[in-house]
Amino acid sequence: MAYARGLKPLAAATAVTMTAALALVFFYAPLDADQGFVQKIFYVHVPMAIVALCGWVAAGVMAIRHLRTGDRSWDVRSYVAIHLSVILGVGVLATGSIWARASWGHWWVWDEPVLVSFLVVFLLYCVYYPLRFSIEDPDRQARYSSVFAIAAGAFVPLNFVAVRLAESFTHPRVLSQTGGDLPGEMRLTFLVSLLAMTLLFVTLWKLELTSKHAEARLKRLRRRLEAREPAAVA
Amino acid sequence: MIRAARAILRKDLRLELRTKESVPAMTLFTVVVFVLFHFGLDRNSLDGSLASGVLWVTLLLAAIIGVTRLFAAEREQGGIDALLLAPVDRTALFLAKAAALFLFLVAVEIVALPAFALLLLGPDLLEALPELLAIVLLADLGLAAVGALVSALAVETRARELIVPLLLLPLLVPVLIGAAHATEPLLRGSQRPEDLGRWLGLLSLYDVVFVLLSVAVFDFLLED
């Protein structure tokens, strides 16, 4: 039960950090002078985006390990990481859209390079599912999914560079909102939120892996039982 | 390895010359799409960003056909088993397939670019030809590398025709950005291209990353 080890303390730490982050967001972080209350969505949106992107890149690294070692459990790890990141991605696009509507007046803005590249990457990772589940042979499924995870993982930074170049072409400006010039209280809140989101991701990832592992074991046991039953009747 | 790659490439080119499957279809497709854009946009001539966008989106869509067909002959006729049984490095297979796709794309563009200039383009294309050539070749290189990888990824799936466009188009967004932005000033008229170096640099970076990446992971595709 290597998967389940440490899951409980991890879950507890996640709950505590999550609560602390929410408390900081609502009671400690100052209101943004320019955008007001809606700016607080930043503490959900940006950590979610960072964690989703890191999850995708990490899935690529896990896929490399799968291809290197031939150990299929690494493919499952990579799959679960991609899956969770896609779910977070939906959240990122939704919160980004809300934030854009509130502060720029449009549900979608094309001149926000980070959001646009995120959309492209998100669309790419949505194809992971039809690709993975239209290959029947489990061994081949794992290998092809890993190749996809590696190619897409390398594509993530490349795409960001490309979209950033394209946007700065028409809108020469530096993105300072998420940069280092946050005031101290905001930065602390942001960092705690980021930590909470990371912990949440790791907890869910471990939980899903544990459940997948248990499921596989259950299936194996059932099969063994079925194989034995006719003999017992006879 | 180079010899094996050349042999596979020669086989692919001969097959294409005899069956005339991919290149004529892709070429015809580009011309049809140009006509569609004429009616869809309701414009008799295009220039600037509209022209470069139409040109590159059409070329990328045409590339989908080539990528879908890239392993089709082997798949349908069972030749892939023989190819995989042969003591040939997978890298040779990748190089051959990517080179075949590259040549197909160049062949398509030899017809598609004049057709575009004739049918839709307002400004004269000839003055910008050297720059355009560099852009097209760099973009084709990236397209060929990614196309061969995607084709090999999709060939074992049940829904190959669905997976290829879904997988290929998001992966090609940087190529579209680089190529369309680089082409745009060329199609605006007599202006000298600004920022050409930056976009060529982006395309080259993309090409290098995806050629290396494809060579590295291709071994794991098309096994057994």
Image (tube, rainbow, N blue to C red):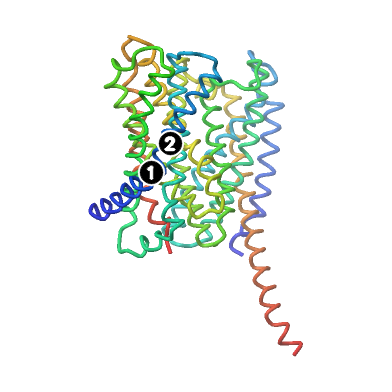
* A60, above or below B181, in the image: below
Q: Are marks 1 and 2 in contact (CB under 8 Å)?
A: no
Residue at the image point whose x is 51% and y is 48% from the top = A59
Q: Residue furthest bottom?
A: A234
Q: Quadrant of residue B90?
A: bottom left
Question: Mark 1 against mark 2, which lies toward the viewer?
Answer: 1
Q: Which mark is residue B20?
A: 1
Secondary structure under the numbered disc 1 in the rendered image? loop
* B2, above or below B133, in the image: below
Secondary structure under the numbered disc 2 in the rendered image? helix
- In terms of depth relative to the viewer, which is nearer, B134 or A105? B134
The amino acid pointed to by label 2 is: Met
Q: Which mark is residue B26?
A: 2
Residue at the image point whose x is 47% and y is 45% from the top = B68
Query: Where is residue B211 shown, x and y percent of the image?
Result: 34, 42
Residue at the image point whose x is 47% and y is 20% from the top = A167
Query: Where is residue A223 shown, x and y percent of the image?
Result: 67, 74
